[in-house]
């Protein structure tokens, strides 16, 4: 290249612009990924929740049943949920408004007490309340709660038997509840006919019927049931906790924790396997004596000295016999004697890390949170529990218990109660002014009721009782609310206290409800209006 070419090339090099490396500026926005791409590697899609439930419902329900049936911890957690939610039973507290029928407050209370008495007798008689004649109403509510945990929903059919059928079984009432396993409700969807996962909907999205797959005479048949009868009374009870506004079916509460439970089972199996292997050991004896190659070399020396191999073998054999006599393994600890220069080692399997307890505890906390119970109740581990921690656990889980009671258990009993009360008034077993026609006109006011469950657990009963007394005295609570906290009705408490007071006074034992430290019964006579006491003739102090 000539001088001109070199000059032109140098000019082009000098005039070429330099390209700087791009700089990354920090930004604040949604889905800002990590340097390792943690978000970009996670695949997710936006679909309808009901479509997703319909797609995975069978698999989720099957896994949930398998986990519960093969895990003592999960089985105990389900029982704990039942005990927290309903206890022995949800007690009926009838709260009718009968003012439109001419009842005063005292007459309303008397009528409600009679309804509660008859309801309890009916609900605890399997022949009267259960379609199959096997379970009481509280037992059927327990089964419904188990279905809600495993399947995500509870389903029942309300049937009414005519008089010939009742006479056949020797019973009085015709209202019957028949629980249906949720997997019998089909998952078929036909949007053109408004069938969504086995539920028929009208143009406004309200359920009008349900399609079940019933087994009759050994064959599965699809049968449709109307949601309500011609009089508007419910025939199908379908209770679930919806996630989205379009949901028509529920999903198991274990769905979000199934992977966690699978991890916990794998961790338990691996830990058990390690513990079993640790009971197996191996022993090695390290010795400076020759191995196979050395023995072969000694055999080659036999050409020069015929006695050398035999002498060496005798020497090694003597040492092995001494080692065999000294090395012994038994139940008791022993000291082994080995030859000079020899070393005995025992080998066992070892776990790589001692992180089983903290990791398993974290898995159990996640499972307990998904089910809706406390970690202590789920794991039965109270080693680190304190008064404050127990109070905080109860305070955080109790709203979940109340919500489950009001959204799942109470609607089931309310539906059955309304159907039963409809029959009781319709057939005249419970009198009502105006008869059945008055009941039909004021049905909503007459069937209103509250369902009271077990009391809120406390870490210190004395402190809780003092707190209740303080709330009553400073006017921030009332007796009905405090009684409801313990699963009691204030009317029942007043009536029972009155009966016990009369019983004690008749026996000459005084008043059992007198203030602490007072042994005298309450005075039978009242003070005069001017403040004087007839028994003493003294003036009152005005206090």
Image (cartoon, helix red, strand yellow):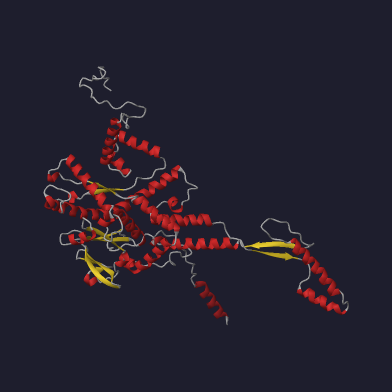
**Residue 72 image-quadrant placement:** bottom left
Instruction: Examine the image and state in which quarter residue 319 appears.
Output: bottom right
Image point (77%, 66%), residue name: 320
Is 427 placed left or right of 487 in the picture?
left
Residue occupying the point 57% across, 58% down? 353
Residue 5 in the image: state x and y as whole percent: 55, 80
In the rendered image, the quadrant that contains the N terminus is bottom right
Q: Is residue 317 above or below residue 121?
A: below
Numbered circles on residues, count: 0
From this viewpoint, which residue is outermost toward the bottom?
Answer: 1
- Residue 306 coordinates in the image, percent (x, y): 87, 77
**Does residue 408 sit above or below 94 in this rendering?**
below
Whether residue 392 sits left or right of residue 506 in the image: it is right
Report the quarter where the C terminus lies: top left
* Percent coordinates x, y for residue 419 in the rendering: 21, 55
Please state which of residues 126 and 357 is positioned toward the viewer in this rendering: 126
Which residue ends up furthest to the right in the rendered image? 304
Across and down, in percent, residue 538 comes to: 26, 17
Up/down of 514 relative to 493, above or below = above
**Residue 126 versus residue 473: which sits nearer the camera?**
126
Residue at 26% from the left image edge and 49% from the top image edge = 120
Q: Is residue 342 visible?
A: no
On screen, residue 107 versus residue 480, left or right, reads left
Q: Is residue 264 visible?
A: yes
- Residue 516 in which image quadrant: top left
């Amino acid at each position: 290249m000539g001088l001109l070419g070199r000059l032109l090339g140098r000019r082009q090099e000098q005039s070429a612009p330099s390209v700087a490396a791009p700089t990354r500026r920090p930004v604040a926005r949604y889905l800002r990924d990590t340097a390792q791409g943690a978000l970009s590697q996670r695949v997710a899609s936006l679909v309808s929740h009901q479509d997703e439930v319909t797609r995975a419902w069978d698999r989720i329900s099957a896994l949930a049943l398998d986990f519960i049936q093969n895990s003592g911890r999960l089985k105990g957690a389900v029982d704990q949920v039942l005990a927290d939610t309903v206890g022995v039973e949800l007690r009926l507290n009838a709260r009718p408004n009968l003012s439109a029928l001419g009842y005063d407050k005292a007459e309303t209370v008397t009528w409600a007490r009679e309804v509660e008495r008859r309801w309890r007798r009916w609900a605890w008689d399997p022949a009267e309340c259960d379609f199959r004649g096997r379970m009481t109403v509280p037992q059927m509510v327990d089964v419904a709660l188990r279905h809600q945990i495993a399947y995500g929903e509870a389903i029942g059919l309300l049937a009414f038997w005519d008089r010939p059928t009742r006479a056949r079984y020797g019973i009085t009432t015709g209202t019957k509840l028949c629980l249906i396993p949720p997997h019998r409700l089909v998952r078929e969807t036909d949007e053109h006919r408004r069938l969504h996962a086995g539920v028929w909907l009208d143009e406004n999205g309200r359920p009008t019927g349900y399609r079940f797959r019933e087994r009759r005479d050994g064959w599965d048949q699809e049968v449709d049931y109307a949601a309500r009868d011609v009089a508007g009374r419910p025939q199908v009870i379908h209770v679930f906790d919806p996630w989205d506004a379009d949901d028509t079916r529920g999903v198991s509460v274990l769905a979000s924790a199934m992977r966690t439970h699978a991890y916990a089972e794998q961790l338990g199996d691996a830990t058990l396997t390690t513990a079993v292997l640790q009971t197996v050991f191996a022993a090695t004896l390290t010795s400076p004596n020759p191995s196979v190659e050395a023995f072969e070399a000694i055999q080659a020396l036999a050409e020069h000295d015929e006695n050398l191999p035999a002498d060496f073998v005798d020497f090694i054999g003597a040492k092995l016999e001494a080692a065999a006599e000294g090395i012994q393994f038994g139940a008791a600890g022993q000291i082994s004697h080995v030859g000079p220069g020899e070393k005995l080692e025992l080998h066992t399997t070892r776990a790589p890390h001692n992180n089983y307890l903290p990791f398993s505890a974290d898995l159990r906390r996640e499972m307990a949170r998904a089910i809706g119970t406390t970690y202590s109740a789920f794991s039965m581990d109270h080693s680190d529990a304190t008064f404050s921690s127990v109070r905080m656990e109860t305070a955080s889980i109790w709203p979940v218990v109340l919500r489950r009671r009001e959204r799942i258990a109470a609607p089931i009993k309310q539906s059955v109660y309304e159907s039963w009360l409809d029959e009781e008034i319709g057939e005249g077993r419970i009198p009502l002014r105006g008869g059945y026609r008055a009941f039909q006109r004021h049905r909503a006011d007459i069937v209103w009721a509250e369902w009271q469950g077990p009391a809120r657990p406390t870490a210190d009963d004395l402190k809780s009782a003092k707190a209740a007394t303080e709330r009553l005295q400073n006017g921030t609570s009332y007796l009905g609310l405090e009684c409801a906290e313990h699963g009691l009705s204030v009317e029942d408490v007043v009536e029972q206290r009155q009966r016990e007071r009369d019983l004690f006074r008749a026996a000459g034992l005084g008043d059992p409800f007198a203030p602490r430290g007072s042994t005298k019964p309450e005075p039978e006579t009242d003070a005069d209006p001017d403040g004087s006491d007839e028994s003493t003739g003294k003036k009152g102090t005005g206090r």
